[in-house]
Image: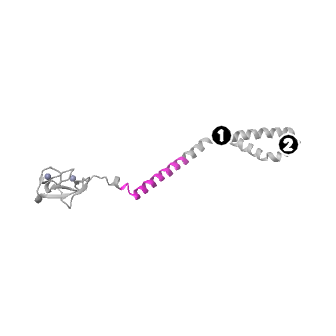
Amino acid sequence: MNKTCARCQKVVYPIEELKCLDKTWHKTCFKCTECGMTLNMKTYKGYNKLPYCEAHIPKAKATVIADTPELKRIAENTKIQSNVKYHEDFEKSKGKFTQVADDPETLRIKQNTKIISNIAYHGDLEKKAAMEKQREAAEIADVRDLTEKIYQISL
Ligand SMILES: [Zn+2]
Ligand SMILES: [Zn+2]
């Protein structure tokens, strides 16, 4: 049984036969799949078992190479860098948020919290004095309750 040309489907005689890409072609039928430029064994570029000229070989290399460990590594690094970038942005926006939060009202609350914290810290010392001064002790207890509430809110 005679072989048939992969392009024109006509019989290929040995004299005009060109074996390439697991197929048989007429030498004259071995052309670029895209532009029809006549190719030979030296000039053709095979892709998907079809011949292409240099200019029209499908640029699928990126996809193919993307499966190599090296490319995967790079892709992974890019992802990590993206995460880093994301965190950078997050830190920046956090900085902005802090600035926004530093309005007079917030500052006042912060200041009060600091004062209350100090009072709470010194509370133990003052407790001794408070033994002698019941009224003062009651005040400190109030402050401590308030401090606890503020801590709970900020948690
Ligand atoms: Zn042919
Ligand atoms: Zn071409």
Query: Does residue 70 sit above or below 149 in this rendering?
Result: below
* Quarter occupied by the C terminus: top right
Q: Is 94 or 55 nearer to us in this picture? A: 55
Q: Is 34 or 114 nearer to us in this picture? A: 34
Name the side, left or right, on which 109 lies relative to 30.
right
Instruction: Determine which quarter of the picture holds residue 54.
Output: bottom left
Q: What kind of element bears circle 2? A: helix
Residue at 26% of width from left, 54% of height from top? Answer: 47
Query: Does residue 100 sit above or below 12 in this rendering?
Result: above
- Percent x, y of residue 67: 38, 55
Residue at 70% of width from left, 40% of height from top? Answer: 150
Q: Which amino acid does the dot numbered 1 rest on? A: Thr
Residue position for label 2: 130
Q: Which mark is residue 106?
A: 1
- The span picked out in magenta is 65-91
Instruction: Determine which quarter of the picture holds residue 123.
Output: top right
Task: Estimate the spatial distance between the alpha carbons at disc 1 and disc 2, rounded to whole Å.
Answer: 32 Å
Residue at 66% of width from left, 41% of height from top? Answer: 154
